[in-house]
Image (cartoon, rainbow, N blue to C red):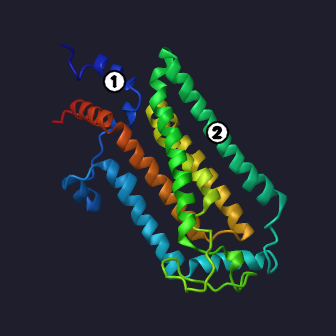
């Protein structure tokens, strides 16, 4: 029987897709992370769920409770000359809004095509499930955001008094008056075409671990560019983009756990054995 601690065994495990993500022993000796770790909260839940959710709540307090949304939108509105000068600008409207949405859709179709090819070719079969995960994560993220937009009834900045519109501002969680027309601006739909690709972090973590942070940067960067362009057009407040970012990240995390949890547990047990701990 091979010694699980031998150099040969370490080398063989390093070739398992995604092994590098879970083979790194993580310890939290001090502070809240340490207490959570001792309480049995796994490190993935801490850094992939609890920390992002805490940051999300804090940012919402600033944007919604302390008026950060209207402060940012107001400065953009004044900077553009007291009207949304970039609303129909070729860069923000045609290139980033329309072109970015089409590029994201084409990329998704490319992922689906690659998954079908991998499924039909036995030599590429190991790529099939990661590609399926990526396609599902992007589809679910954009679909959930679109579904929420259909019933949240939140207005765009350009619809509101003080920003060139005629409607009154209502807090995000406040009930709309009976006479108020429904809005279709929350969460940020176009930003989801970028933030949905945060799932690249997990896809590449399973297939090319050294590139996982570059995948994260692609998804985050695309979402930020799409979101800022829409804010410059007056289509969204910053909180709309923040909610889209959080929704897309939650879909990426939870779908990955649902599809790959068993393999992750095996890799964690191997990592514990390599570190000399009891799995």
Residue 267: percent from the left, percent from the top?
30, 32
The residue furthest front is 178
Residue 57 shows in this picture: yes
Residue at 37% across, 31% down: 19
Residue 244: percent from the left, percent from the top?
54, 60
Q: Earlier in the sequence, mark 1 or mark 2?
A: 1
Disc number for residue 13: 1
Disc number for residue 107: 2
> Residue 29's image quarter?
bottom left
Image side of residue 207 versus residue 78, left or right: left
The residue furthest left is 278
Residue at 48% across, 58% down: 247
Residue 263: percent from the left, percent from the top?
32, 33
Image side of residue 91 versus residue 7, left or right: right
Residue 198 shows in this picture: no
Asked if marks 1 and 2 touch (Cβ < 8 Å), the reply is: no
Q: Secondary structure at mark 1?
A: helix
From the viewer's side, name the closer residue of 71 and 162: 162
Disc number for residue 202: none
Q: Secondary structure at mark 2?
A: helix
Tell us which disc is closer to us: 1 or 2: 2
The quadrant of the rendering that contains the N terminus is top left
Compared with 171, 9 (above or below) is above
Q: Residues within 10 Å of mark 2 (few under 14, many from 20)?
A: some
Q: CA distance from mark 1 to mark 2?
A: 32 Å
Residue 159: percent from the left, percent from the top?
70, 78
């Amino acid at each position: 029987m091979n010694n699980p601690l031998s150099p040969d065994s370490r080398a063989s495990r390093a070739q398992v897709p995604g092994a590098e993500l879970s083979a790194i022993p993580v310890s939290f000796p001090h502070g809240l992370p340490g207490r959570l770790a001792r309480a049995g909260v796994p490190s993935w839940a801490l850094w992939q769920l609890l920390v992002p959710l805490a940051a999300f709540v804090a940012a919402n307090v600033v944007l919604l409770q302390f008026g950060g949304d209207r402060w940012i939108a107001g400065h953009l509105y004044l900077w553009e000359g007291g009207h949304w000068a970039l609303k129909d600008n070729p860069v923000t409207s045609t290139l980033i809004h329309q072109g970015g949405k089409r590029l994201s859709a084409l990329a998704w179709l490319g992922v689906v095509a690659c998954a079908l090819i991998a499924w039909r070719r036995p030599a590429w079969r190991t790529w099939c499930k990661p590609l399926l995960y990526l396609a599902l994560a992007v589809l679910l993220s954009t679909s959930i955001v679109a579904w929420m937009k259909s019933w949240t009834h939140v207005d765009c900045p350009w619809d509101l008094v003080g920003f060139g519109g005629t409607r009154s501002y209502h807090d995000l969680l406040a009930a709309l008056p009976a006479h108020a027309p429904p809005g279709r601006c929350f969460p940020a739909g176009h930003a989801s075409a970028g933030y949905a690709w945060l799932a690249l972090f997990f896809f590449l973590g399973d297939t090319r671990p050294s590139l996982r942070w570059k995948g994260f940067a692609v998804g985050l960067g695309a979402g930020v560019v799409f979101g800022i362009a829409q804010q410059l057009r007056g289509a969204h407040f910053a909180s709309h983009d923040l909610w889209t970012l959080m929704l897309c990240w939650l879909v990426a995390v939870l779908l990955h756990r649902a599809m790959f949890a068993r393999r992750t547990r095996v890799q964690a047990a191997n990592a514990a054995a390599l570190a000399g701990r009891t799995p």
